[in-house]
Amino acid sequence: MAMLEIIDLNGGINATQSPDAEEQRFLRLLQAKQTAAKLHFFIQDALGGSSPTVWEVARSSITSHSTTSFGQVRVLDDLITAESHPDSQKLGRAQGMITSSDLDKTALTMSLNLYFTCGKYKGSTLCIVGRNPMGRKNRELAVVGGTGVFRMARGYAISNTYSYDVDMNHGVLEYTVYVAYVDDNEDCV
């Protein structure tokens, strides 16, 4: 069997192929109804304190001398909440990697998986990537995919720093996500 099979997405499956169930499902998804949603939530970014959720895992030789922390790589497992207070309803986790990647300005390259643990999106993820210039308001990041309810998701997220407590080393990030995804109710989580 060939490692790469060509599928004519407009006319169905090439007659010489014997597609498996997943190929059929994918073709159904391409033609399925799309749903759009606006999600609003907060991410609790604990950089310090008794239970930090952001950890440095690597740095370049110039990170400690850089005004932008260039080359610093951190991983995170932050709490997603419905409101700005960390004790508000827990919606899930923001898990991923952030890298300080601009020599001149404070900006991060982000790769995040938003993993939802309750409600109608329970068990589903949204994948968000992009450049996050920390000094700006209304920072836009791309939604490039998802799983579960958010299968074949696309869209964008607007991120803002809602608050930052210097003493606690705890930031609250506000996210508004505009996402389109395939309505595949028969296979939803």
Image: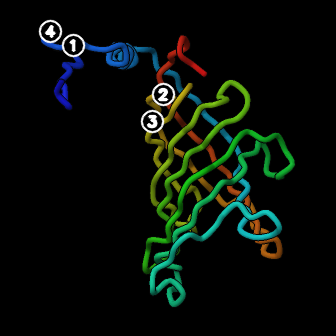
Residue at point 51%, 90% (across, down): 65
Can you tell which quarter of the image residue 55 is in?
Answer: bottom right
For marks 1 and 3, the one nearer the N-term is 1
The span from disc 1 to disc 3 (Cα, nearest Å) is: 24 Å
Q: Which residue is mark 2?
A: 151
| Image quarter in which the C terminus is found | top right
Looking at the picture, how far across and down is residue 187, in whole percent?
53, 16
The 10 Å Cα crowd at callout 3, few under 14, some 14 to 19, many 20 or more, is: many
State if disc 4 and disc 1 touch (CB < 8 Å).
yes
* Mark in the foreground, 1 or 3: 1
* Location of residue 77 with respect to 164 vertically, above or below: above
* Location of residue 176 with respect to 1 vertically, above or below: below
Residue at point 75%, 70% (across, down): 48
Can you tell which quarter of the image residue 168 is in?
Answer: bottom right
* Location of residue 139 with respect to 23 vertically, above or below: below
Q: Which residue is mark 1?
A: 13
| Image quarter in which the N terminus is found | top left
Secondary structure state at the residue bearing disc 3: strand
Q: Name the residue at the bottom extreme.
A: 65
Residue at point 47%, 22% (across, down): 182
For marks 2 and 1, the one nearer the N-term is 1
For marks 3 and 4, the one nearer the N-term is 4
Looking at the picture, how far across and down is residue 177, in whole percent?
58, 41
The span from disc 2 to disc 4 (Cα, nearest Å) is: 27 Å
Which of the labelled discs sits on residue 69, or is there none?
Answer: none
Secondary structure state at the residue bearing disc 1: loop
Which of the labelled discs sits on residue 154, or is there none?
Answer: 3
The span from disc 3 to disc 4 (Cα, nearest Å) is: 31 Å
- Residue type (three-letter) at the residue carrying disc 2: Arg
Q: Which residue is mark 4?
A: 15
